Amino acid sequence: MWQQIRSNQTRSAVLTIFMGALLLLLGYFLGWYFFDSGTVGLIFALILWVIMSLVAYFQGDSILLAMSGAKKISHDDHPRLYNIVEEMKIASGLEAMPSIYIIDDQSMNAFATGRDPKKASVTVTSGLLQNLNRDELQGVVGHEMSHIKNRDVLLMAMCSVLLGTIVILAWYASRFMLFGGMGRTRRSSSGGGSGQIIIIIVAIAFMILAPIMAQLIYLAISRKREYLADASSALYTRYPEGLASALEKLATSTDQLKSANQATAPMYIINPFRKKGRAAENLTSTHPPISERIRILRSMAGASFADYATSYQQVRHTSKTLIPAAALAATGTVALRAPQPEAPAKLDQVQQTRETSNLMWNLNKYNTITCACGTKLRLPPGFKLPQVRCPHCGRINPV
C-alpha cells in the first residue's frame, strides 16, 4: 500500500496548504477590519498558521487524546484488548506497538491518532469493550491499525487542529462584527464609505462560510479512507464478518459520544453524532453509509484487497476501484478464516461487563474494599469518611 501512503502524504500537504490559505484570507479580512490593514492580518495569520501546523504535527495526537478524555492503559489493565492490538500490529506489519487508550463512555466507537507508525495510539470506548466479542473487537482494531499504517492519522490530526483554529477564529470575529462592531460600521458609512459596508458584509459572510468550506475539504477524503481501512481490516483479520458485525452493533447504538466535536468526528470509525435516543443515521457527512460498508464486507468471497474491490464494485454498481493496482496484485489470494470460538453469549457478556467495569474503576483510582460477606465496595478518590457500611450485610468496614 505504499502508493496509498504516498497519496496520503501528498494530500496531507495539500489540505494543510488549502486550510492555511483559508486562514490567510480570514486574517486579511480581520486585519483590514480591526487595523485598517490587510497586511497586518496576513502576517498574523501566517504566524498563526505556522505555529498551529507545528503544534498539530508534534502535539496534535496529545491534544486530540486530551480532548477525548482518553486514559492510557497497559497489558495488565486489559490483557484481551492489549493482545488484540498486538495481533493486529503483527498482521499489519507496523514497526512499533501503538499505545492503547480508553474513553470512559457507554457509546461504542474508536479512533487512531499519531504522527507516524512509530508514535501512534489506538483509542476505544468502554462501551465498545463491553459489547463486542473478540472477532468484532479485532475487526475494529484492524480498521484503526490501517489508519496508522496508511498515514491517515497525521492527515486527520493536522486537519483537526487547523479546522478547530479556523472555526474558533471565524466564530469570535463574526460575532464581534455582528454584535460589537456596528459602531465602527456606522462611523465608516457616515464618512461616505458605502463600499466599506459592502466589504464588511462580504467579510462577515466569508467568516461564516470559511469554517464550512474547511469542513467540506476536511470531509472530502474521509469516505475513501474509511473504505480503505475496512478493506485492510478484512485482510489483517481474514474475517470480514467481524468488522461487519461490529459496525452493525455500532450503528444500532443510541448512545452519543460526549467528548466528540465537529473537528474530531471524522477520526472515529463511525460518526459519533446522532439524535438523542436514536440509532446512528445511515447517511452522514463524515462517513460512508454504514449499511453499505456492511454489505461490502459481507459480500467478500475472500479476505484480499482484490476481494474487497470486487465486492465494492458490485455493491455500489460501479467500475471504479479505491485500491491501487499494485496493492491488488501484491496480496494475491487470501482465504477467509473461521470465527473464533466464544463462551456462551450471556456468560461472555457478563464477563466483559465485569472486566470493563474493573478497568474503569482502576483507571479512575477508585479504592476497593472487600467486605467479609464478599461484596466489593468502590469508593471514589475523594471519599473522606473513616468507615463505610456494606449495603448487603450491614457490616461497618474501615476505609
Image (cartoon, rainbow, N blue to C red):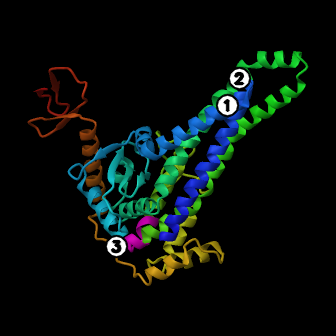
Q: Identify which residue is drawn at 65% across, 78% down.
A: 319
Helix, strand or loop for disc 3 = loop
- On residue 339, which mark appears? 3
Residue annotated with mark 2: 35
* Along the viewing direction, whichever of 370 and 93 lies nearer the viewer: 93
Q: Quadrant of residue 311?
A: bottom right
Q: Is residue 143 visible?
A: yes
> Residue 116 placed where, x, y %?
41, 56
* Along the viewing direction, whichever of 249 and 73 lies nearer the viewer: 73
* Along the viewing direction, whichever of 233 and 28 lies nearer the viewer: 28
Query: Tag 2 or tag 1, which sits nearer the N-term?
Result: 2
Please say if the residues under marks 1 and 2 sit with CB atoms less than 8 Å apart.
yes
Residue annotated with mark 1: 41
Report the predominant secondary structure element of the magenta stretch.
helix
Left or right: 97 as drawn, with respect to 207:
left
Q: Is residue 196 above or below residue 322?
A: above
Neighbor class of circle 2 (other Cα within 10 Å; few <14, some 14-19, many 20+) is few
